[in-house]
Image (tube, rainbow, N blue to C red):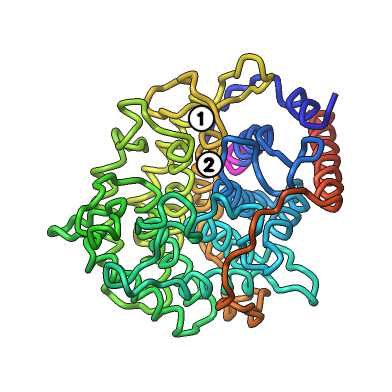
Amino acid sequence: MNLLNIIISLSSIVYAIDLDVHSYSSLCDAITTTSQAVLTYYDGFKPLGVVGVFEPPYYWWEAGEAWGGFINAWYFCQNDTWQSLIYDSLMHQRGSHKDYVPANQSTTEGNDDQVFWGIAAMEAAERNFPNPPDDEPDWLSLAETVADSMDSRWDTQNCGGGLRWQIFTWNNGYNYKNTVSNGGLFHLAARLARYTTNDNYLDIAEKVWDWLTDVGFVQSNGTILSVFDGASIDNNCQELIPYQWTYNYGLLISGCAYLHSHTGDQKWFDRVLSLLHTIKIMFFTNDIMYEQACEGVKTCDNDQKSFKSVFSRFLGQTAVLIPDLNESIRPLLEASAVAAAKTCNGTVPGTGRANACGVQWTSGSFDNNAGLGQELSAMEVFTSVLAINETTIGAFSVPFSKNTGGNSTGGVVLNTDRQVDHGFQKKKTIDSVWAGLLTAISFVFFIIVGILLI
C-alpha cells in the first residue's frame, strides 16, 4: 500500500461536521477534517510525486491557494501538523529563479497562477511562518519578487496597460487581459504597501486600480461596483466577457481593505463598501455563499469550484482589517460555514475518500460533487469564521507588518527583468522524490497520533 492509500484509509471514516461557529475547538476540528480531505488529492505523497502540487486535473495555481489557506489554518489553530508540508511546498515550487515561475509549469502558468503563490508567500510573512535560512530569500522577499516581476510585464501597448492573462506567448489566452491577473497584482501590491510602507507598492496598486476602472473591468453604478472577467487585446479590450466571479471580488475588496488600513484614505473604504454591497446582492442567498455564474446551472469547472475558497479568505481578511464591518460580514461567513459543513459528509465511490464536501452549500446536503476545490472552499470558510470569531478577533487576527512584529524583512528582490523562457522540465529530481516521501511520512505520523488520541 502506498503512502497516499494509507492517508486515504486513515481518513475513510465519515464524520458529519457538526459545526459550532462560536467554538474555537469546533472550528479547528472542522478545519482539520477538511484539510485532511484536501491532502488526499496531494501529488507529493505518491511515488515519484511532485512536492507542492496536487494531482491532475488540478492546476498549479490551486496549490498556491491551498498553501496560503494552510498557513492561516496553522496560525489560527496553532497546529504545526502541516508546518513541514507547507514549508517544503513553498520552497520547492519557487523555481530556479525563486520567483514562482518554475520550469515545470511553463506549459500552463499564467500571471494569475504566479500571483497565488506570491500571495501564499505574503500570508507566510504576515503570519510569521518560519522563514527560510538566512542564505535564502525570506517570505517577504519572495512576495516582493513576484509583485515586481509581474509589474515588469505591464503591457502599455495594448488596451492602455494591464497584464495579459498568460506569461508565455505559446499559451492559450496570451491575447487576453483579465481581472484575476490584474486584481491579483493589485491585491499583492496593497499588502506589500501595508507591510513594508514602501510607496512603490502603493503606486503599483493605484495604477492597477485605475486601469481596471479605465478599461471597464470594474464599473461603478451608484453604490454598485461590478467586476467583470476580462477582454481580448484583439479588440483593444472593448468587448467585455461579462462573467462575474467571487474570487475577483475577494481579491479587490481585501486589497482595498489593506490600502485603507495602510493609508486611512476614505476612497478605499468607500470602495470596500461598494464592493460589499454588490457582493451581498450577487453572491449570497439567505446569507449563504454561492458562485452565481455557474452553480445554479451546474456548469462550474474545477477551477470555479475553488473560487469560494479565495472569496471566503479575503472576506474574512476584510472584516479583520476594518473591524467596523465585522457585523456586516460575519453573519455571511457564519451562515456559509454552517451550510458548507452540512455538505461535508459525502464519500467518493472507488477512491476511499470520505468527508467529501459538495459544491452547492445552498443545497443543505452533499450534492455528489466532490473535488479539491470543494474541500478547500469549506476549509477556508471555516478558517475565515475563526479569524473573526469573538475568541480571536482583535490583535491576534490582524496580519503582521514590519512595524507590528513581522519577522520577514525582505530586501532580497531577485532579477525581475530576465527573459521568462525556461523551456520545459522533463524529469523530476531525486531531491523532489525524497522531499515528497519525507513530507508524507511526517503527515502519516501525525494522523496516526491523532487517531490514537481520539
SS state under label 1: helix
> Left or right: 229 with respect to 444?
left
Residue 38, placed above or below residue 213: above
Quickly name the residue at label 2.
Answer: 382
Residue 400, placed above or below residue 382: below
Residue type, label 1 = Ala
Residue 137 in which image quadrant:
bottom right
Percent across and percent down for residue 11 are 72, 26
Picture residue at 62% right of the left edge, 67% below the top: 99
Marks 2 and 1 close (CB-CB < 8 Å): yes
Picture residue at 53% right of the left edge, 26% below the top: 370
- The dominant secondary structure in magenta is helix
How packed is label 2: few (under 14 Cα within 10 Å), some, or many (20 or more)?
many
* Range shown magenta: 23-27
Percent across and percent down for residue 128 are 67, 66
Picture residue at 35% right of the left edge, 52% below the top: 327
Residue 363, placed above or below residue 318: above
Sequence-wise, which precedes: disc 2 or disc 1?
Answer: 1
Front residue (pair 323, 144): 144
Front residue (pair 440, 23): 440
Residue type, label 2 = Phe
Q: Which mark is residue 341?
A: 1
